[in-house]
Amino acid sequence: MRIRPVAADVFIALAQTCVAVLLGQEAARQGQQPLDVLGYTLAVIINMACAFRSRAPVGVCAFVIATWTLYISLGNWPVVGSYGAMIAGYTVTATRPARVSVSCMTVLGLVWLFAGFRTGSDAMPSVAVQALAVPAVLWRFGRVARRSTELADQLAKEQEARAKREVAEERGRIARELHDIIAHHMSVISVQSGLARFVFESDPPTARGALGTISATSQEALEELRRMLHVLRAEDLDGEPSAPMPGLSRLSDTVERLRAGGLPVELRVEGEARPLAPGVDLCAYRVAQEALTNVLKHAPGARTTVEVCYERNHVALAVVNDSTGANPVRNRSGGGHGLIGMRERAKLYGGTISTGPRSGGGFAVRLLLPTSAQPTA
């Protein structure tokens, strides 16, 4: 519920109190004793007590039934206080074990019979049936509500656990990819340091150039290492891919393969394409790859546009389609590389990602990555 439970309880108590007060004014017309000040006071107490039913269901139920019994003993019309008693009994059934709820419903039925005797009703068989049927129906609905709540809580816990597993798996995969990037940087540093040492005296300009390359490469490697430390888990790093990590420069090849497979996709590049940091480049490519894969799987045949925009301090990526069917960017239940993976990658590099339906139809995935991304906590 969007409204808070306590606020909902207060609202319900106020509503049934108003109904009880209005109904009390009809007591004389129904051949019952008119309510005096004490009768109205007890009726208000019975119904307003339900505002605390979620905090202490059993205590409120006992208080309401006891007050209702006193109200009936004074000769007042029982119907006016019955709403509070039924709500309190239902709450106990929906929140407490069966043995407690059965006891409360039994007491409610007995008070219902007492109300029939006290008012001298001529239809006691009908009152007896009500004394059995009303508590039974309330008990049944309360048990169904309790079971539904338990199932909903269990489902929420399972979904949370599955989401955590998928996040861990995706972070492990990102860490393995960053491991390859850093290994590449260290190889470059090793080669350039050997070159600088070899030509240090014979060719100083070449040595200075090699040292400059070492400085830039080591700085980039340190940034990637910081990111990896944020996401690295205990997963085994065996079986890492040996191929070079892809980037936006290979996005055109991916688009061509999808177009050959029957997906009408168009690639648009704005701004001057430039080399990006390997991690940022890989992040943008993986998000585009995942979005296109989801379109192919969940909205085959949808016209799709991939837009890459190189700005001064960031790169923007958008994968937009005009699908009118199922959401092609929804997170898949398996594989662990859906929206959760996209968000983890974007967050790792200080970027933002948004997914959702477009106002004119279709769905869109939009990614914004700073090209000078710093590791995020």
Image (tube, rainbow, N blue to C red):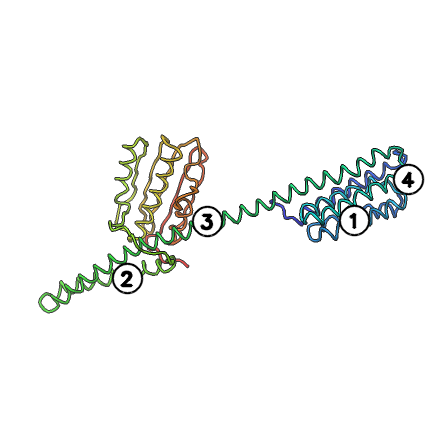
Image quadrant of residue 258? top left
Residue ID for mark 2: 219
State how far apart marks 4 and 2 are (Cα): 90 Å
State how far apart marks 4 and 1 are (Cα): 21 Å
Residue ID for mark 4: 33
Residue ID for mark 3: 163
Q: Nearer the viewer, mark 4 or mark 2?
A: 4
State how far apart marks 2 and 1 are (Cα): 72 Å
The numbered disc on residue 54 is none
Relative to 19, residue 207 above or below: below
Image quadrant of residue 121? top right
Upstream in sequence: badge 4 or badge 1 = 4
Q: Find residue 115 and report its horizontal and vertical position in percent.
A: 86, 41
Residue depicted at x 29% and y 32%:
261
Q: Find residue 370 and report its horizontal and vertical position in percent.
A: 35, 52
**What secondary structure is marked by label 4?**
loop
Nearer to me, 157 or 313:
157
Q: Find residue 206 and report its horizontal and vertical position in percent.
A: 13, 62
Relative to 300, residue 314 above or below: below
Upstream in sequence: badge 4 or badge 3 = 4
State how far apart marks 2 and 3 are (Cα): 34 Å
State how far apart marks 1 and 3 are (Cα): 44 Å
Q: Nearer the viewer, mark 2 or mark 1?
A: 1
**What secondary structure is marked by label 1?**
helix
Upstream in sequence: badge 2 or badge 1 = 1
Nearer to me, 278 or 142:
142
Residue 359 left/right relative to 137 = left
The C terminus: image quadrant: bottom left
Q: Nearer the viewer, mark 4 or mark 1?
A: 1
**What secondary structure is marked by label 3?**
helix
Characterize the local packing of mark 1: few (<14), some (14-19) or many (20 or more) Cα atoms within 10 angstroms. many
